[in-house]
Image (cartoon, rainbow, N blue to C red):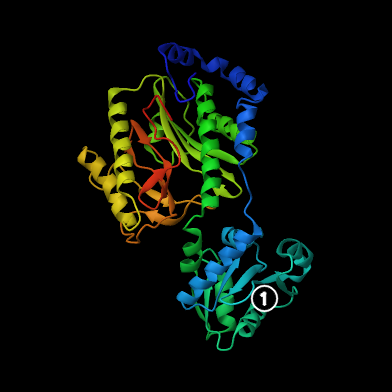
Amino acid sequence: MDRRRFLKTSGLVSAFAAASTSSFAQTISSFNDKKNLIDPELIEKLRSRIVPISSEERSMRIEKAQKLMAQNKMDAIFMEGGTSLDYFTGVRWGRSERLFGMLLPKNGAPIFISPKFEETRAKEQIGNARLFCWEEHESPFELLNKLFKEIASGFNTIGMEETTRFFITQGLKNTNINLNITSATPITAGCRGVKTEHEIELMQIANDMAMEVYKVAVTQLKEGMTEGEYGKIISDLFAEFGVGGGALVLFGEASAHPHGLVQEVKLKANDIVLMDGGCSVEGYESDITRTVVYGKPSKKMNDVFEIVLKAQQEALKFAKPGVSFESVDAVARKVISDAGYGPGYKYFTHRLGHGIGMDGHEWYYVVGGNKRLMEKGNMMSHEPGIYLLNEFGIRIEDEMLITENGAKLLLPKQQSLEVMF
């Protein structure tokens, strides 16, 4: 089968449709026994492009954060274990009721705080960075407040990374009622929301892997399989690349619900097949939706697909540095509304997109009300859709990069309901 096609000939359609529910168990068993469904040379070619983030890059991120802290009048920011800590330091630490985190002053090196009994494990990750520990009977907030006071005289404003849990913020405030606690999002988003060339390349690799997985996955569709069974096939294909990945799979009428239903749906001839997923490469995500038909699409399906594709293309042409995020959403939404599937969110029920990077959903959101202006290096999902209850839904999703002069998709645009790439 042509690598860029889902169903190229009527012979393939007939072959897929002939698979019966009774033979499905044998089909899955046969699939699970196969190895190297993806060309091993292709796997090696993609994996050879992966270059981990270096310590020098992380140092540059910290320097940028400190410049932004000065601009935003913050004396320091604090973050516990999570994506932002990984982004700035490479430290990966699970969250519990015990406080572990990093205090980053606007001048000087990062400072870490850890439970004492975790000291050895902490030192493994933080290297020569300053580390202060608290015993089980001690208050980590008293220790944190003491460190604040040592950073600079007249210390006053601390930014908390946005996912920091409330008990930490509250514990710190109770310890120092005069401390001005604010959001560190202007710092963390200001750094993470603008991707470097290296970050873009890692995301490109993740997109390329997802594309290859989808190409092979559609050859495994069989009538009678459930969404979960097909999702397992996709996850196994990502595993061939040695990365974690998967997809939300929606069949038939379930595709009219953007995130599906609880009840599993079995695949039937001429059903819509919606695949929404991706993988992570060195912590950087891909998020791609392809909607195809298991058989022959109806005229209505084709018509709706063309409207969604036009919405994606028109918004892509409009997006560039200096235009607002909300205006890009408005362009796509107008195409869909003008075609009779409006107004507003009536059939295009969600925002046009979300930022993506080390988190599948992060800053900045392409949605009405977001007046922030796009800038070079912003990366976001670009996913218009039309959802017709009790019939079907069609969504096309790609990652869109804002470049110096405009915007581009990381993958070739979808051609039709029978041609994914």
Is 96 left or right of 329, judged from the image as shown?
right
Residue 1 visible here: yes
Position above or below: 46 against 128:
above
Q: Quadrant of the C terminus?
A: top left
Figure label count: 1
Residue 94, can we see it?
no
Dot 1: element: helix
> Relative to 179, is 245 above or below?
above
In the displayed structure image, the side of residue 382 where residue 75 appears, left or right: right
Mark 1 Cα shell of 10 Å, populated few (<14), some (14-19), many (≥20): many
- The relative height of residue 130 versus residue 89 in the rendered view (above or below) is below
Amino acid type assigned to the residue bearing label 1 in the image = Pro
Nearer to us in this view, 268 or 274 = 274
The x and y percentages for residue 370 are: 34, 59
94 or 61, which is in the foreground? 61
For the point 28% across and 27% down, the residue is 300
Residue 332, x across and y down, in percent? 29, 45
Relative height, residue 23 to residue 245 (above, below)? above
In the rendered image, the residue lying farthest to the bottom is 154
State the residue at coordinates (74%, 73%): 136
Q: Nearer the viewer, residue 101 or 169?
A: 101
Residue 174 occupies quadrant: bottom right
- Furthest-front residue in view? 405
Q: Residue at x 54, y 29 (%)?
A: 230
**Where residue 189 sits: x, y (%)?**
48, 62
The residue where tag 1 is placed is: 140
Image x and y of residue 144, in percent? 64, 78
Q: Within the image, what quadrant is residue 63 found in?
A: bottom right
Left or right: where 419 falls relative to 184: left
